[in-house]
Image: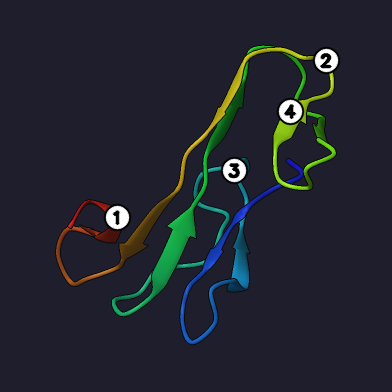
Amino acid sequence: REYAGHGVGRQMHEPPKILNYGQPGTGMRLRPGMTFALEPMVAVGHWLTRVDADGWTVRTQDGSLSAHFEHTLAVTEGDPMIMTIL
C-alpha cells in the first residue's frame, strides 16, 4: 500500500496513481490509448516496508517473503497490449 502503479507517457511516472487494492467498479474507467505500469506486490506477512541502505532494495518491515512485479500495458479497443513481453 506504500507503492503503486502509474500512468506512462512523456514521463516515466505520470498520473494516475494505480493502487494495488480497492473495490471492483470504483476506480477510473479505462479507455483506449491509455498506458499504465501495473505493479502488483504480494507479501506473506505485513505490507509495511523499509528501504535498505543502498536506497533501492525494499523489504517488508517484518522480514516476510514478498515479491514485486511490473508490467506496462496499453488499453486498446480489444485485448490489452502487454508491452513488457513484446
> From the viewer's perspective, is residue 23 above or below residue 7?
above
Residue 59: mark in rendering: 4
Q: Which mark is residue 14?
A: none
Count neighbours of disc 2 (C-alpha within 10 A) and say few if under 14, some if 14 to 19, many if 20 or more: few
Q: In this picture, is 67 found above or below 18? A: above
Q: Which residue corresponds to mark 2?
A: 62
The kind of residue tagged 3 is Asn
> Seen in the image, is 14 located left or right of residue 76?
right
Q: Amino acid at mark 1?
A: Thr
Identify which residue is drawn at 83% across, 15% down.
Answer: 62
Quarter containing the C terminus: bottom left
Q: CA distance from mark 3 to mark 2?
A: 20 Å
**Which residue is pictured at 45% across the width and 47% down the height?**
70
Q: How many circles with numbers are drawn on the protein? A: 4
Label 1 vs 3, first from the N-terminus: 3
| Residue 31 rendering spot, x and y as whole percentages | 35, 74
| Residue at position x 38%, y 75% in the image | 34
The residue at which mark 1 appears reads as 84
Q: Callout 4: 10 Å neighbours few (<14), some, many (20+)? A: some
Q: Earlier in the sequence, mark 1 or mark 2?
A: 2
Labels 1 & 3 near each other (Cβ < 8 A): no
Q: CA distance from mark 1 to mark 4?
A: 24 Å
Under tag 4, what secondary structure? strand
Circles 1 and 2: CB atoms closer than 8 Å: no
